[in-house]
Image (cartoon, rainbow, N blue to C red):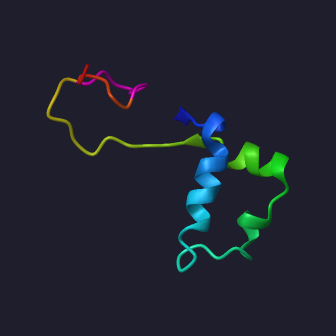
Amino acid sequence: MVEIAPYLEQKLAAFRCHKTQIREDTFFMQLPPELARRTFSDEHFGLARSLVDVPTPENDLFAGLR
């Protein structure tokens, strides 16, 4: 999980740029701000494969690359 709360407005703005995929009148685009913050403030990723040594479970998207 990656905490993205500081970038939530940018994430929602990006959603709004894809009107053919996520319409403005969909349920989750109509959520009250506090509920939207709790719902969309983190991202989850899964490692499909890696070409570098990566500790598991992962806690850093760039592990092994620094």
Q: Considering only vertical position in the picture, is 17 above or below 65?
A: below
Residue 42 x, y percent position in the rendering = 60, 40
Q: Residue at x 43, y 25 (%)?
A: 59
Q: Quadrant of residue 50?
A: top left
Q: Does the magenta-highlighted stretch encompass residue 30? A: no
Residue drawn at 67 percent across, 48 percent down: 9
Q: Check if residue 58 falls in the magenta segment.
A: yes
The stretch in magenta equals: 54-60
20 displayed left or right of 9: left
Q: Which residue appears at 71% of the width and 48% of the height?
A: 39
Residue 4 placement, left or right of 38: left
Q: Residue 19: percent from the left, percent from the top? A: 58, 76
Where, by quadrant of the figure, is residue 49 drawn? top left
> Relative to 12, does residue 8 appear above or below in the rendering?
above
Q: 33 or 10: nearer the eye? A: 10
x 40%, y 26%: residue: 60
On the image, the x and y values in percent for residue 56 come to 34, 25
Question: Which secondary structure is most common in the magenta stretch?
Answer: loop
Task: Answer with left or right where residue 29 lies relative to residue 66.
Answer: right
| Quadrant the C terminus occupies | top left
In this view of the protein, which residue sits in the foreground, 6 or 39?
6
When the figure is inspected, residue 48 is found, relative to residue 32, above or below; the finding is above
Residue 3 lies in what quarter of the image? Answer: top right
Location of residue 11 in the rendering, given as x and y in whole percent from the top left corner: 59, 51
Specify the farthest residue to the bottom: 20
Q: How many marks?
A: 0
